[in-house]
């Protein structure tokens, strides 16, 4: 489990459907130690603070194992940061990590909170409007970390597993419940019992659960 690349970038303004659009999806790899605070990496920024960033989504993570697949789909080479991720990682795919898992990386300690929900800006970046839906359907979404302990991190460092969450709900499983098997009430109940789940995903699943009960 390794951090292959650290990627940051401030929001920029691009044109979208004839109008200006601010986005922070364009990230670039950086070298050396970078300080990871409770809300983001130094030098990073988000344009849409409702759907991106904040304590539950301080770090966007993407798996290097998926790059080959997307290079074929998009017909182009992709560099680290291509999916707007802050951490490009290896050995930590969605099928093998769980909501609530805690890891040490460099001086920092982080915890998985939810899958990444790809938005239309990813499609805009590659002129492929259907790309966010394809990402959801493959399950190759990546995920987010909250920061339990701030500190410096650097590319090349290895992740040390501090605690595996006993609920054992993988990111892949959370995506299944979100997008595919929306009436799996046993699965939804188990997910809602994971205290580490992000507030936004908890609210979404709680609303679904309450609607079913009503």
Image: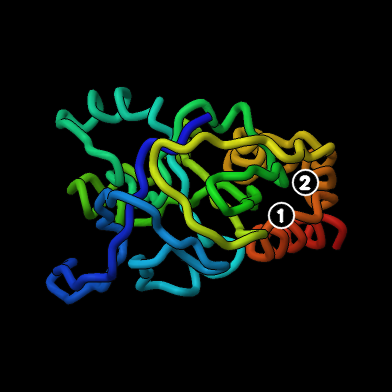
Give coordinates of residue 146: x percent, y percent: 61, 58
Query: What number is the disc on residue 17?
Result: none
Q: Residue at x 30, y 46 (%)?
A: 81
Whichever of callouts 2 and 1 sits on the residue coming sooner in the sequence is 2
| Percent x, y of residue 93 | 53, 29
Q: Residue 4, located in which quarter of the rendered image?
A: top left
Percent coordinates x, y for residue 180 in the rendering: 60, 37
Q: Nearer the viewer, residue 86 or 174?
A: 86
Secondary structure found at label 2: helix
Question: Which numbered disc, 2 or 1, marks the residue closer to the eye?
Answer: 1
Q: Is residue 101 left or right of residue 15?
A: right
Tell me the distance, in whole angstroms, between the alpha carbons under discs 2 and 1: 8 Å
Q: State the residue at coordinates (77%, 34%).
A: 168
Is residue 130 something that shows in the picture?
no
Q: Nearer the viewer, residue 186 or 3?
A: 3
At 67% from the left edge and 59% from the top edge, which residue is drawn? Answer: 148
Whether 24 is drawn above or below 63: the answer is below
Q: Secondary structure at mark 1?
A: loop
- Whether the residues at callouts 2 and 1 have beta carbons within 8 Å, the answer is yes
The residue that mark 2 highlights is 191
Residue 13 visible in rendering: yes
* Residue picked out by circle 1: 197
């Amino acid at each position: 489990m390794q951090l292959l690349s650290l990627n940051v970038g401030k929001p920029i303004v691009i044109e979208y459907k004839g109008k200006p659009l601010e986005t922070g999806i364009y990230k670039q790899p950086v070298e050396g130690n970078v300080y990871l605070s409770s809300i983001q990496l130094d030098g990073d920024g988000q344009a849409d603070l409702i759907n991106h960033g904040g304590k539950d989504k301080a770090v966007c993570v993407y798996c290097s194992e998926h790059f080959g697949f997307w290079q074929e789909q998009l017909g182009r080479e992709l560099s680290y940061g291509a999916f707007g991720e802050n951490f490009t990682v290896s050995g930590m795919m969605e099928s093998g990590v769980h909501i609530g898992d805690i890891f040490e990386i460099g001086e920092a300690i982080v915890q998985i909170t939810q899958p990444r929900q790809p938005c239309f800006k990813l499609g805009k970046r590659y002129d492929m409007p259907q790309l966010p839906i394809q990402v959801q359907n493959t399950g190759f979404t990546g995920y987010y970390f909250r920061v339990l302990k701030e500190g410096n991190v650097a590319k090349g460092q290895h992740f040390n597993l501090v605690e595996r969450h006993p609920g054992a709900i993988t990111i892949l499983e959370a995506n299944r419940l979100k997008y595919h098997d929306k009436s799996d009430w046993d699965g939804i109940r188990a997910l809602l019992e994971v205290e580490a789940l992000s507030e936004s995903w908890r609210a979404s699943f709680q609303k679904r659960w309450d609607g079913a009960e009503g």
